[in-house]
Amino acid sequence: MRKGLTLSTRLAILVMSTAMLTASGVGYLGYRNIAPVAIERTLAGLDANASWQVRELSHLVNGATADLMGFRQIIGIDELIELSLDPSKTVAGGGSLPQWRERIGHRLALELENKPDFARYRLIGVANQSRDIVRVERLANGKIRIVPDDQLAFAGGREIIELGMSAKDGEMLISNVEFEPIEQPSAKAPQHDATALRPIIRVVTPVFSDEGARFGVLAATIDLRRPFERLRDPVRASSKIYVVDDRGHYLFHPDASRGGLAIGFPSTLEQDFPALAEALANNRWAPAVIESRNGDRFGVAYQPMNAGTETPLALVEAIAEHDMIRGPMLAWAKSTLVGGSFAVLVAIALAVAFARSLARPLSEMTRAVESLSGGGPLTLPRNAGGEIGVLAQAFSSTMQESREKTAALRREKEIFESIMNAMAEAVLLVDTEGVIVYENPAAVALRTSPTGITGPTWETSVESFLADGVTPLEVDQRPGRRAMRGEPIDRFEFVVHVLGSDKIVDVSGNARPIREADGTISGAVVVFSDVSELKETERRLHQSQKLEAIGQLTGGVAHDFNNMLTVISGTAEILLDELADRPDLVTIAKMIDQAAERGADLTRQLLAFARKQPLQPRNIDVNTVVSNIKQLLRPTIGEHIDIDVRLDPAVDPALIDPSQLSSALLNLAVNARDAMPGGGKLLFETANVMLDDDYAEHHPEVKPGRYVMIAVSDSGAGMTPDVLEKAFEPFFTTKSVGKGTGLGLSMVYGFVKQSNGHIQIYSEEQHGTTIRLYLPRADSDVDALPSITPIEGGTETILLVEDDELVRNFALAQLRGLGYRTIPAADGTAALAEVRRGTPFDLLLTDIIMPGGMNGRQLADAVARLRPVKVLYTSGYTENAIMHHGRLDPGVLLLSKPFRRADLARLVRAALSRADHQPAEDEAGPERKSAAS
């Protein structure tokens, strides 16, 4: 009896047939759909590559534009223009014309050396037959040459001058692509020989003198040979890249016989691809498949390089249509063959697997036991019967229990690893030999240098010091070693230095011993915390407390000292008036007055540093302030220093105290003068700036927003890094004894910070210093200037409250001399007694800081609850009684000590003309009612 096919054989044949039919169907459908997709993707790739190539060429032009914009601001360009326009001058800005030409030439040579695709930089003057003033060029051998003055060409700059003369100030003009000789033409090098010519493009911008006259042009010449050479190897080997000008003439053609340069090429792009006429006319083209003049179909991408309103060149990439499809078709054929083969193999494997499923349960059980003994997975027969089935079930239960325990241990390990990985603290496990057997990622990060380099072990990666950062930490005193001796360690602070770098970390360590069941120590666990930020915060807090203490001391000194200066300066003023006919005594009185004024300046500087000076900000035009400062400095700062200002005519008004701003700028100018004993340049600049969130993130004290910037720059000796770090500290000075107080920059710093501004200092040795003041921007227009009124007295009655007897007697004499009637009081209690007695008066003139538990503001509120009153405050230090956030409270008039007779007269009249003082609402009520009754 003939035996038929087995079931496993028939299933194998069925699976193999199904796989082959499926592969054939998929292949046919792929063939029908792959061509349109391949063409679409290839066109997209051509367009992306052409766009990228054009951007590469545009980057060269943009780089030249940025260079020329930077060259217009380089040091020496103004001096060079000045000397070139005025032959009678031999020196400007500390240098002669040849010296400035040489310096600028070296600067341009450095720029040219770093830009291999740039051929030359030129500064050409309009006068003298368009003669080059500075010319730096790259020779044929690649070397950079600064052309000497006697070799500068006279006629070589005419076409550049004509191009640049039509430009506005700050405008950049881009020339068309031209071909110029690499070397001078000779009989051996024909004019159109590509080996002797190179394609170039020029970028030109005009240069103006300080008076606004056109002086000449700055020009950069870009050598396009290297960018064109890169076009010979496109991303797709079968595609070709062409470069054409705005008329469609080829500049680069891969079939050209002169290294790709299409000099005198017999056809144009429009002739070769008529469908591209629209692209040349409109500079717009969507990638498409078009016909060439020979009838062949090509996929074409067109990308123009736009420079302003001009299109000096465009890039075209083309590929034959059959090449667009060939690659995907080959890939399709290969994938179909591989897929069909794979399907047959899978079918065979399935057939074999099915046949093996008919094997005996005992064979499966045997293989399962052998696999388990070899460490492999356990696969038991599920449908076995009899004794083998019972054995399989028992063995399966045992292995299931083992798997569950193993999984629990694995989960515990994963939880431990997750906890260790998530911890910010460094965790180390140390064995009995002191060897670190485990460290979490935070521990590895702690001993890793900023460059990512770390040693193989903890001991080879770091060195430890005591908290002073100098004394080495002995090995047996480290937390891990001490824990191994049974000591519990808590918050042990020391310093870790990562070897091979300057990374230093302040660390606080805890450690505990690890004990076995019998109590023996088998190791230790150590936890390190990075407390560097905490230490830095403590340092800043200490610095803030120190400055606050200085501020409190400053306030007390200023109060008492200003009281004395008020009497001294006022008495000196009286003596000057009374001793006009005694010249010898007038000289002494002037000396007393000058000494008192210097003392007043010192107290003002101290209060400015402590940010406790009363500010009276107004909306001001900073350009006007800077212009006034320039006029003030002209006769005083010296002829050896050149003062220049660059004011932004569109600068916004600033909300700032104008007198304090003038003092700050004078301080900066004096410091700049002292830094330039041999002469130099002092520059004032104004501009609107935006300090964004990124800047504020690096300077936490800055609030993002718009600011008005004033920059003061000098060309002096500059500062060393250690001097720069202490520049704003009070009483720090590099000047000799008697030459400075060390409060100049501190006063400027305190004034700017108190005004809600920001200050930055930039300095480099031998290159000068720039200090930028960022002032708060006003929300409205510039305020009108206050009118100046003549000294005027009156006949009103003034209640004068002053605790210092000398000051009180001096003020009484001055007020009576102005015609006023006066009522003196030594403190707030005495003044209130006069008010309650009904003593009539027209003005309360009160000191702010007084003994007895009542300051001037509290006295004014108390009097206002008893009767209407006009108030004028006087003080040398307000202690926030009438000043908050560094500014006088609205409606408050303050006569600052020490004061002059004219200041007293002016502010008394101003106070008498103002409205009555209004007390604080929360304290008004019962006392006013009782007084009225």
Image (cartoon, rainbow, N blue to C red):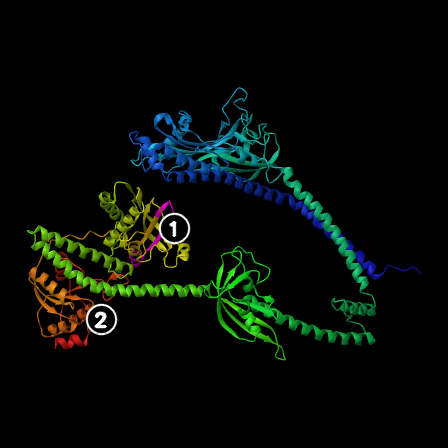
Secondary structure state at the residue bearing disc 1: loop
Residue 461 at x, y percent in the picture = 56, 60
Looking at the picture, tell me which residue is in the foreground, 630 or 926.
630
Residue 504 at x, y percent in the picture = 48, 60
In the rendered structure, which segment of residues is drawn in magenta? 750-769
Query: As displayed, is residue 738 above or below residue 931?
Result: above
Secondary structure state at the residue bearing disc 2: helix
Q: Give the quarter of the figure containing the C terminus.
A: bottom left
Residue 91 at x, y percent in the picture = 31, 34
In the picture, measured across the screen, residue 923 lies left or right of residue 545, that is left
Please check the rendered image and state whether residue 883 is part of the magenta-colored stretch, yes or no. Answer: no
Dots 2, 1 in contact, CB < 8 A: no
Query: As displayed, is residue 480 above or below residue 631?
Result: below
Q: Which residue matches tag 1?
A: 720
Residue 730 at x, y percent in the picture = 31, 58
Q: Which residue matches tag 2?
A: 921
Residue that appears at 82% across and 65% down: 358
In the picture, measured across the screen, residue 569 lies left or right of residue 159, that is left
